[in-house]
Amino acid sequence: MTAPASTPRLTVPGHAGVLARLGSPERYSRERMELIIRRLADDLAPGADASRHVGGGNEYAESRPYQIGDPLRRLDWRQTARRGVPYTKQFEALRRMSVYVIVDASPSMRVSSGPISKLGAAAWLAAALGLVSLNRLSPVAVMGARPISQQGRPSANPDRFWHDVNPLLVGAANAAVPMRLALENINATSRTTSLIIALSDFQNEHDAPALRHAACAHDVLAVQLIDPAELNFRRGGYIAAAEAETGRRFLSRPSAERAGPARVRESLSQSNIDTISVSTHADVVGEVRRALELRGLRSGRRA
């Protein structure tokens, strides 16, 4: 499919990251949007799992003495020869970890000083991460754009995935659920350890404590999205500002505000939560891919 001349491509050169060059997802048609998401998913997991079926479906656990009725094809010939009595191999089925991708759609995420807002970058990332999970046969739930009453459990159904992620992509996440409530819902309904990927600027004071609580039972990756303007205030003097979350106006010294993202990152890291911070104008996709590789998530299991 050939894109119009005015439509950014994934291969456009320049210093800005790919998401900044793409801009807001709502500017694209549904067909073009899905094509871009599939390209982004490929970039997040390059060369991983060319086949939809990984391995044989079972993983060796241990060997034990042979019991009547055990399949002969599972005999452990090495242990049998070593011990002089028959031994049988035992396997455990490989389990796919459920994945929750939570997008913070609060007012502070909509602020932008460039071609893409933090919410726009989070929407692209959520869709691509969800698609990577589906390609690995891992059930996924994309949360943040719908009320709690409409949130479902992770599913491997592609139609359900597109239904969940579509409001984020078309800019219709007006009834967004607070991240704290989404995390509380996961803690209340998930009976097994899941992977939680939180995409946020973490400016709401309740989000970090809720994430730390979720990390007690789940595997958590926090992706902190930062608008460059949040780091580039001039030093000295005071500025008149307003909180994006509450609208409260205040005077502030810019030099003090510059440490905000770093303080959040340090707070989460101290709770053993893997955290990466990235500017919306930087290589967001590359940074997230490197974080996933370091954690060993591309194997479908915890590192």
Image (cartoon, grey):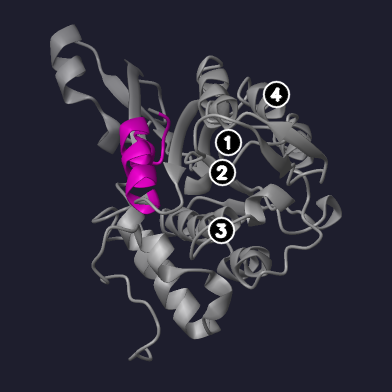
- Rate crowding at label 1 as few (under 14), some (14 to 19) or many (20 or more) other CA atoms within 10 Å: many
Where on the picture, by quarter, is residue 151?
Answer: bottom right
Residue flagged by tag 2: what amino acid is it?
Ser
Q: Front-most of 1 and 303? A: 1
Residue 297 magenta-highlighted: yes
Observer-side mark, 1 or 3, equals: 3
Mark pair 4, 3: CA separation? 25 Å
Residue position marked by numbered label 4 in the rendering: 209
Q: Is residue 71 above or below residue 272?
A: below
- SS type, badge 1: loop
Residue on which the image places disc 3: 117
User: Which sits earlier in the primary sequence, circle 4 or circle 3?
Assistant: 3
Q: Pick the quarter of the image with the C terminus.
A: top left
Between disc 1 and disc 4, the foreground one is 4
Numbered label attached to residue 98: 2
| Residue kind at label 4, given as amino acid type | Pro
Mark 3 or 2, nearer chain start: 2
Q: Distance of mark 1 from mark 3, alpha carbons?
A: 28 Å
- Is residue 300 at least partly visible in the picture? yes
Part of the protein shown in magenta: 284-302
Q: Earlier in the sequence, mark 1 or mark 4?
A: 1
For marks 4 and 2, the one nearer the N-term is: 2
Q: Mark 1 touching mark 2, by CB under 8 A?
A: yes
Residue type indicated by callout 3: Ser
* Disc 1: which residue: 194
Q: Amino acid at mark 1?
A: Ser
